[in-house]
Image: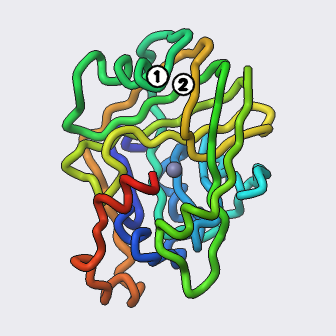
Amino acid sequence: MENSKTLYQHGTLALLVPGLLTGTITMGELLAHGNTGIGTGEGLDGELIILDGVAYQIDSKGNVNVLANDFIMPFANSHFANYQELTTISDATPAEFEKVSLDGKPNSNTFFSVLVKGTFSYMKTRAVAKSSRPFDTLAKTAEKQSIFEAKDVTGTLLSYYSPALFHGAAVAGFHNHFLADDHSIGGHVLDFKIKEGAVGIQVFDTLEQHLPITNTEFMEHDFSKDDVASAIAEAE
Ligand SMILES: [Zn+2]
């Protein structure tokens, strides 16, 4: 049976910092661990969002592409959707969305996902442009990103929350990706305002962390020289 309490993650955010951007998992393998997820392609090739088992890439030109099973990624996560209705939300800023998702608590000690389906009076996203070998560091690739904005757009916001303790493995706090129903905008969310939406929540009790042990660059890299926490905070 599908385990809806497990969040599967391939790679860690930390390996993006020094530019270890080789794709080390295929979309087919990732989808075996879930029908919902986020990630990025090899060389930070756009922003990914997986909804209902379909994997989409928002590229740096703003195009939404459906990805094949042989698409490769350095970092991604997936899980089997089993969201519990939490509430409906209207006229909400990111801070209000986070407060609702955390049920008023200042933080959470476990991973969870939040899905908002609805209308957004404002949406601001970014998509990074693919870098080729030798790959740039995260700070450098983050400079080569496109920003997209839309007003009154209907779509799905997929959010993952990571506890502060795991910063480096993932982004501490909320990490949000978005896809408009008409595919007019999507990507890594920078800012938004929810006009009206249904909020679902799914709490995980297990993080399944998969690492690319057949990738020599990763296995031989000395992460002690990277200022992982602050580089991530800056870029994300
Ligand atoms: Zn992202």
Kindly report which numbered mark, 1 or 2, lies closer to the viewer in this rendering.
2
Is label 2 in a helix, a strand or a loop? strand
Q: Is mark 1 within 8 Å of ligand 1?
A: no
Disc 1: which residue? 200
Of label 1 and label 2, which has the lower sequence position?
2
Under mark 2, the amino acid is Val
Q: Nearer the viewer, residue 101 or 81?
A: 101
**Quadrant of the rendered structure where residue 65 is?**
bottom right
- At horizontal 74% and vertical 54% (from top left) the residue drawn is 66
- At horizontal 41% and vertical 35% (from top left) the residue drawn is 113
Horizontal arrangement in the rendering, residue 164 relative to residue 172 (left or right): left
Disc 2: which residue? 116
Under mark 1, the amino acid is Gly
In the rendered view, tell whether residue 6 sits above or below residue 216: above
Callout count: 2
**Quadrant of the rendered structure where residue 121 is?**
top right
Is label 1 in a helix, a strand or a loop? strand
Q: Nearer the viewer, residue 159 or 77?
A: 159
Q: Are marks 1 and 2 in contact (CB under 8 Å)?
A: yes
Horizontal arrangement in the rendering, residue 107 relative to residue 158 (left or right): left
Q: Residue 148 appears at what percent x and percent y?
A: 71, 42
In the rendered view, tell whether residue 108 sits above or below residue 143: above
* Disc 2 residue crowd, few under 14, some 14–19, many 20+, Cα 10 Å: many
Q: Residue 191 appears at what percent x and percent y?
A: 55, 33
Q: Residue 131 appears at what percent x and percent y?
A: 63, 75
Residue 168 seen in the current view: yes
Which quadrant would the N terminus be assigned to in this image? Answer: top left
**Quadrant of the rendered structure where residue 174 is?**
top left
Say which mark, if any, is on residue 120: none
Horizontal arrangement in the rendering, residue 4 relative to residue 103 (left or right): right
